[in-house]
Image: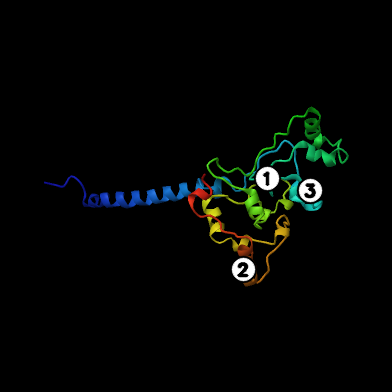
Amino acid sequence: MAQIFPTWINKLPLAVVVGGGFFSVAAVGGAWYFFSPEYTDVGYQPVQPVAYSHKVHAGDLGIDCRYCHISVENSAVANVPPTSTCMNCHSLALRDSPKLAPVVASSTSKRRMRWVRVHQLPDYAFFNHSAHVNKGVGCVTCHGRVDQMEEVYQVEPLSMSWCLECHRDPAFNLRPLDQVTNMSWQPPRDPEQHRTFAQQAMTERQIQPPEDCSGCHR
């Protein structure tokens, strides 16, 4: 009696197992990448109600970050500046510019501007700006060179693994306290020189970043 199925079909179960395994690995790997903050969050640049240029204000004019983000040294949040901060300058400078019309309207009506937040952590993750700024972590570490951005966008993933990488070895991201808001500050070219400075800073500033879950999930 002739065989109903050819002999090669005996290899079909093995092919299914191997192919299924490969597909599973590819699916998990693809999901890990395409749903990770590196892919979904980095580059996020929402449209703001006013085309505010950090390059002009923080870069060309050299306005210190803390002039607008006044609570960054003593609060968990950096705060979005109120319209009154804008009008400190723009009550005179370019007040009649069409680009500033929403800001002037906000000041006149006493209704706050609806700025769109760029850097947004989930509610289950706690981050304290003051704890980082007062220990010598520069603004540029997390926010990038905003002094060169016409419109602010997210540079770093701000993921748990990204934060833990710094918590486990914060030396590279430490700088002199008076250089925290200096966007163009660079560490010494000799990495050992900078690590010596960082180790001394960690001792003097009592820097012991938490690595346990409760450090950020409270």
Mark 3: give few (<14), some (14-19) or many (20+) Cα within 10 Å: some
| Residue type highlighted by circle 3 | His
- The residue indicated by pointer 2 is 195
**x%, y% of residue 50?**
75, 37
Name the side, left or right, on which 158 lies relative to 108. Answer: left
Of 201 and 25, the residue lying toward us: 201
Quarter location, residue 4? top left
Determine whether the residue tagged by mark 1 lies in a helix, strand or loop.
loop
- The residue indicated by pointer 1 is 78
Q: CA distance from mark 2 to mark 1?
A: 28 Å
- The residue indicated by pointer 3 is 57
**x%, y% of residue 19?**
34, 50
Residue at point 68%, 38% (across, down): 47
| Residue type highlighted by circle 1 | Ala
Give the farthest residue toward the right. Answer: 92
Name the side, left or right, on which 64 lies relative to 4. Answer: right
Of 168 and 27, the residue lying toward us: 168
Which mark is nearer the camera, 1 or 3?
Answer: 1
Circles 3 and 2: CB distance less than 8 Å? no
- Is 35 situated above or below 180? above
Mark 1: give few (<14), some (14-19) or many (20+) Cα within 10 Å: some
Circles 1 and 3: CB distance less than 8 Å? no
User: Which of the two labelled residues, at mark 1 and mark 3, occupies the earlier sequence position?
Assistant: 3
| Residue type highlighted by circle 2 | Arg
- Is 200 situated above or below 208? below
Residue at point 82%, 38% (across, down): 87
**x%, y% of residue 56?**
79, 48
Determine whether the residue tagged by mark 3 lies in a helix, strand or loop.
helix
User: Which of the two labelled residues, at mark 2 and mark 1, occupies the earlier sequence position?
Assistant: 1
Q: CA distance from mark 1 to mark 3?
A: 17 Å
Determine whether the residue tagged by mark 2 lies in a helix, strand or loop.
helix
Give the farthest residue toward the top. Answer: 109
